[in-house]
Image (spheres, helix red, strand yellow):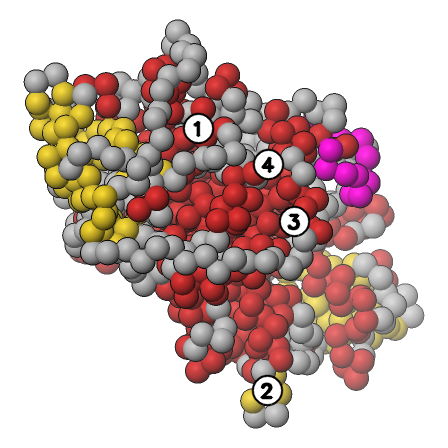
Amino acid sequence: MSTTTTDTDRGVAERAMGIGLRGLNWLAGSDLLDRIRIRKGVERALFQGTKQGFRTATAAGRTFAAAQKLGKPARQPRSQSKGLFDITPDDEQGMFQEAGRAFAADQVRPAAKAADDERTTPPEILAQATELGVAMLGVPAELGGVMEEGAATTAALIGEALAHGDMGIAYAALAPGAVATAIGLWGSAEQEATYLPSFTGEDVPAAALAILEPRPLFNPMRLETKATRDGEGWVLDGAKSLIARASDCELFVVAAYAEGIGPTLFIVESGTKGLSIEDEPAMGLRPAATGRLIIEGVRLPATSILGEGERSDYLECVSRARIAWASLSVGTSQAVLDYVIPYVNDRQAFGEPVSNRQGVAFAISDIGIETGGMRLATYRAAARADQGVEFARQAAIARRLAAVKGMKIGSDGVQLLGGHGFVKEHPVERWYRDLRSAGVMEGALLV
Amino acid sequence: MINLEIPKKFKPLAQQANQVATEVFRPISRKYDEAEHAYPKELDMLASLIDGMNEGSDMGGAGAAGVRRSANGSDPGENRNGSNLSTVLGIIELCWGDVGLLLSMPRQGLGNSAIASVATEEQLATYGGKWAAMAITEPEAGSDSAAIRTTAELDGDEYVLNGEKIFVTSGDRADLIVVWATLDRSKGRAAIKSFIVERDNPGLKLDRLEHKLGIRASDTANFTLQDCRVPNEALLGDPEVKEKGFAGVMETFDNTRPLVAAMAVGVTRAALEETRRQLASAGVEVDYDTPALSQSAAAARFLEMEADYEASWLLTLQAAWMADNSKPNSLQASMAKAKAGRTCVDVTLGCVELCGAIGLGETELLEKWARDSKILDIFEGTQQIQLLIVARQLLGKNSSELR
């Protein structure tokens, strides 16, 4: 797959030719890339979601029905590493990364402040993210997905790219893809046939992978959302926190402690009796319009368990979510670095730029070093997931770096701007709030 | 394709190095920590073995094979895993065994690295196969290597060196000392050159050997150079006084910083592995699925340290990989050294704390690693110097703007 020309001006479509990579071709065929480069100014509709009451019903969802069912579940094959250490994305990964960066710079960043203020992500941004393919990265090719093999690394690169624009918008845009990825990784043939086609079209449903619960020291291994046996089926009770676009969600994958089994993922369609949504505004991730899913006596059939309900599936799900959040932390941390560098170089104090002082300069160095380490740790975890080798340790490490270093970077970003960092004229206070959030979230996103 | 695992082709090398570390270094680690200044004679045989490893161009052995960025015939766009990466991987394993002993390895000195990196073919023929130490630091010039006062005056076809050098690693045992000296103090850094001095040169006088906090297996020598005469050909690199000359000297450090980062990574891993065992014996196992804060404080602390270790390891491999692929890596080399150096100190000290009396006591090596680690955040550029280099690059500043 070596490229023989160094011409960087080749068009997207031209680059895709002859390489035979499904995702690359698909992305190249989309006219989104050209459009977002041309359309610089976004006519951002001042979309204000209907003000939610204290508690509302879940969205009236579409009817999910199996179209054509495969004999056995389709799975994305593992990626085949050449066995060489390599930090460069391959052509396909690079294309998605490039597209994500362009989208983040041209569309996401300019929309970020208003989205944060209004707690909503403009629908056209969500639509463009869908065009970028973010909802179907985890959909196997047989079911209309665009990736030929495991897409965890690609998802991490896109998460990083979008979060460089804005983490809250990234969360809103990427959340439905987590459900598709979960079903694509662990769902039965029936579940895949029923739900995945919705994620490969233009009208992708809002959907949520709901694991986090509202309590201190939340531990996804000890869920308080319970699934008790009810004849052949199950009854679920509990609450799930900080769900992106909760009141729009048409589909949930909910983690519950299943009687006699342990933590298990259930597919729950919106509109199911016993589900309701409470608004749950938070410190960060505000463009995602976070809400709480209340689950009261929700009766589900036996077939609602995702796939075989294997414990290993659940553990993998938790780890993949941590990698996804780490990738968002990397993107936002890089945003901090890119923003504070020109600021401290321009800002004068005591007759010279503040960056001439080691106290300031060393803080910049540390942001660069820790962002670099966090990025590599995240990539490593994601690449291992794609290769089908154990990655729980690497995911836990990426998460610790995201929680600890990411927060320090968020804090230093504000600190380096002093009082100016504390006011909303600059984005660093938003990144401070988002970087705290990324280290706390569980589930919700997947690579 | 992104893949941050040890390359398949270097796994045998890493395993070999680990075997050496396990079977040669570890058993004598405590012995030479106690017998400071005694030469670890066990290393002689090993050194020959490593010379053999260095022969293969892609197998870097213990580090002194040099880090020449040789242009090779392969496609420039093609991903390359070469001697920088293999060297770093070898060093990590050997320093997991004992960093002081690695530094004492015959013919594996920093001077060897400098010679291998910049020497002419003639110089390689003359000085190849010998053990070379590096003498930069002076009593009045440490991190500020442009401020060195040792002078070199041209006298006919010889240079005459005068000055004082301290902290010369393996200075007593090496065959050669690469001495940094200035041709003209008024010309600043442009006039600084390095000279190869034979250890038995009568003008090179050993003043004393240092007693140290750690890496006690490695001798650290102080010298006086008194009318020390060396032939013209002993000057490494370009004899002209020009600004780029010093940059050339400093470039050596771009290549050696990842090697020192690798030493730190190796020591860090040693401490973590032993601590994991000790904690397990106390009933504490780190669970990677459960959030850190829902585990015991000891497990959470361990995970924190492991995360810093992983970041150091990856930054170090990144810097080496970039060198293998002819990408400028000065920034990443300093990032790796800064991160690995401070992580090594934090982790080895944290491990002693977690293991309590077992950590402090001399029956285990934890306390030794906690002493060895400190130098790794100091030599080849202190933490603060690395942060300066990183900051200057990120901020686009020169050394007069950001001092």
**Disc 4: which chain?**
A
Please report whichever mark, 3 or 1, sits nearer to the chain's N-terminal start.
3
Residue beneath disc 3: A36
Q: Check if mark 2 and mark 3 are on a common chain.
A: yes
Alpha-carbon span between mark 4 and mark 1: 24 Å
Residue drawn at the location 41% of the way across and 58% of the way down: A48
Does A239 sit above or below residue A194?
A: below
Label 1 secondary element = helix
Q: Is residue B71 above or below residue A117?
A: above
Q: Which residue is mark 2?
A: A348
From the image, state whether disc 2 or disc 3 is nearer to you: 3
Tell which circle, 4 or 1, labels the residue nearer the N-terminal end.
4
Q: Could you tell whether B103 is left or right of B33 in the image?
A: right
Mark 4 — residue? A93
What element does badge 4 sit on? Answer: helix
Q: Is residue B176 magenta?
A: no
Residue B168 falls left or right of residue A137 = right
Q: Position of residue A254 (x, y in %)?
A: 25, 35
Q: Of the residues tagged 1 and 2, which is closer to the observer?
A: 1
- Magenta range is A1-13
Q: Is residue A6 covered in magenta?
A: yes
Residue that extends furthest to the bottom in the rendered view of this protein: A350
x and y percentages locating residue A261 in the rendered image:
14, 24
Question: Chief secondary structure of the magenta span?
Answer: loop
Q: Chain of mark 2?
A: A
Query: What residue do we see at 25% from left, 35% from top?
Result: A271
Identify residue for label 1.
Answer: A198
In this view, the residue in front, B192 or B14, is B14
List the single residue furthest toward the top: A71
Label 3 sits on what residue type?
Ile
